[in-house]
Amino acid sequence: MIALLTYVFIGMALYFLQTLFLFHPVSLPSNYAFNFKVPFKEIKIPFEGSDSIDLVKFLPRDTVCKGVVIYFHGNKQNIERYAKFADRFTQNGYEVWMEDYPGYGKSRGSRSEDKLYQQALLIYQLAAKEFTSNRIIIYGKSFGTGIAAYTASTQECKKLILETPYYSIPALFDCYAPIYPTSILSIYKIPTYQYLQVVKAPISIFHGTADGVIPYRSASRLKNVLKSKDEFITIEKGTHHNLNEYTLFQEKLDSLLH
């Protein structure tokens, strides 16, 4: 009986506290001034009533712009945490458009899976007004890989690049709580594997074998849904946070941006 009660109690905690496990935002006041090393422009985009999206556009220093990378970041803090990654793209001649999710940074509003999708599509639509689809690269990092995959499954783009993706949110939770029916308990589904099956653009995936946040075994299941022209790049001993430090990652990403 005690074991059963413990099982039920932990299951309830997993259900009601999962958003605390999944999202780790840091909010910023509306008048907060960003100070990035890369040239940038910040815009505020109204969205459904009082909601708003804070979008930062990191700009290449060269006058010739190859296109835009729509960058969906991870689940921690806000744009300030991920701005350091923009430089590799801008050095290759791309603008980088990075949005903060609701409750992150200066973006306002409540979060839901559908709202994350809709806001991503809005960002894509704004980019499509300035760039043709063959000049748009969709990039996802960690949590943002599922949002990126969804966007690329519904919109045309030059490439979809995913860094440390997950098979789905329930599958990710299953890595930590395998004795629970995570497909039922998960409020967020984000089935990356389903979206990848209908993406027409070339897909490149990076994942490290020592990833302690999204286990390699979870990401490697995505190999089964990739097209023949897609690629899954394994970074030996790479973790969830340091792939950008590996020469293989740097050289391969640069080649994708040429």
Image (cartoon, helix red, strand yellow):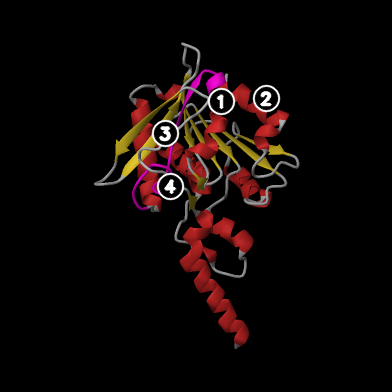
Tag 1 and tag 2, C-beta contact below 8 Å: no
| Sequence-wise first label, 4 or 2 | 4
Residue carrying label 4: 27
Which of the two labelled residues, at mark 1 and mark 2, occupies the earlier sequence position? 1
Check disc 3: other Cα within 10 Å, few if <14, some if 14-19, many if 20+. Answer: few
From the viewer's perspective, tell me whether residue 219 is left or right of residue 45.
right
Q: Nearer the viewer, mark 3 or mark 2?
A: 3
Gap in angstroms between the C-alphas marked 3 and 2: 33 Å
> What residue type is disc 4 on?
Ser
Are the residues at dot 3 and dot 2 in contact (C-beta closer than 8 Å)? no
Say which of marks 3 and 4 sits in front. Answer: 3
Numbered disc 4: secondary structure: loop
Amino acid at dot 1:
Asp
Q: Are marks 1 and 3 in contact (CB under 8 Å)?
A: no
- Mark 1: give few (<14), some (14-19) or many (20+) Cα within 10 Å: some
Q: Which label belongs to residue 251?
A: 2
Query: Where residue 139 sits in the image (x, y, percent)?
Result: 51, 34
Q: CA distance from mark 4 to mark 2?
A: 34 Å
Q: Which residue is mark 1?
A: 87
Q: Is residue 131 left or right of residue 198?
A: left
Q: Residue at x 30, y 46 (%)?
A: 51
First-in-chain label (1 vs 3)? 3
Q: Which residue is mark 3?
A: 33
Q: In x, y percent, where is residue 66?
A: 48, 17
Q: Which callout, 3 or 4, points at the residue further toward the start of the chain?
A: 4
